[in-house]
Image (cartoon, rainbow, N blue to C red):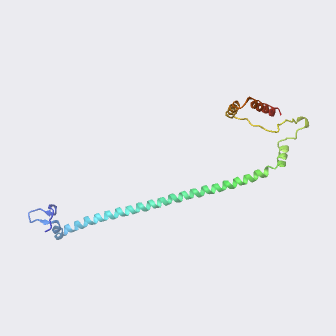
Amino acid sequence: MVQMRKIDYVYGTSAEKTREEIYKNNEVLKEKRKYRLNRVTKVKIFVSILFLFTLGFLVAYRYALITDLNFKLYKLETQYEKLRSENSRLKVAIEKDTDLSKIKSIAETKLGMQQPDKYQIVYIRVPKSNFTVTSSDYMSNTRNNANKTDLFAVILNKAGIIRKLLE
């Protein structure tokens, strides 16, 4: 025997009947039940269509963003190529315009420059070996190392530096 729940019975003045028996015999209730089931089905279909539409819209939006980024990238690459060609053109123009005879003629004609006279020329004696200015840290390390060596080597080193400066 199938055990039924109390909810399945409809209580009234007549004998107890199950809901299934009531819906099976009554046409109005059958139609109401069909209407409710159809309404639930319609809602499910509507939600499914809405979900698919949203999903399709998101995919289309993503492709639109990708296309927009590709277009911007193309524009930037085109601009980069134009700048590179302009840069190479300017390099060629600079190399072409650095002809010394051309610079001399422009200086003499447009700027009014001229060759100096003999009395305007000043000769400067430049030492054969050039030297660099060292940092204070390097000099302090040199002095510390010099203190560690003997006094005679330090004096010879200082004399060599003075001799180079006088040349």
Q: Nearer the viewer, residue 13 or 59?
A: 59
Residue at 35% x, 61% y is: 47
Where on the picture, by quarter, is residue 114? top right
- Rendered-image quadrant of the N terminus: bottom left
Residue 38 in the figure: left or right of residue 18: right
Residue at 76% x, 50% y is: 94
Image height of 132 relative to 36, above or below: above
Residue 87 in the figure: left or right of residue 115: left
Q: Position of residue 153 (x, y in %)?
A: 75, 32
Q: Position of residue 54 (x, y in %)?
A: 41, 60
Where on the picture, by quarter, is residue 86? bottom right
Residue 141 in the figure: left or right of residue 120: left
Image height of 112 relative to 63, above or below: above
Q: Position of residue 124 (x, y in %)?
A: 85, 35
Image height of 110 relative to 164, above or below: below
Q: Position of residue 163 (x, y in %)?
A: 81, 32
- Rendered-image quadrant of the C terminus: top right
Residue at 64% x, 54% y is: 80
Residue 56 in the figure: left or right of residue 161: left
Image height of 128 relative to 159, above or below: below
Where on the picture, by quarter, is residue 159? top right
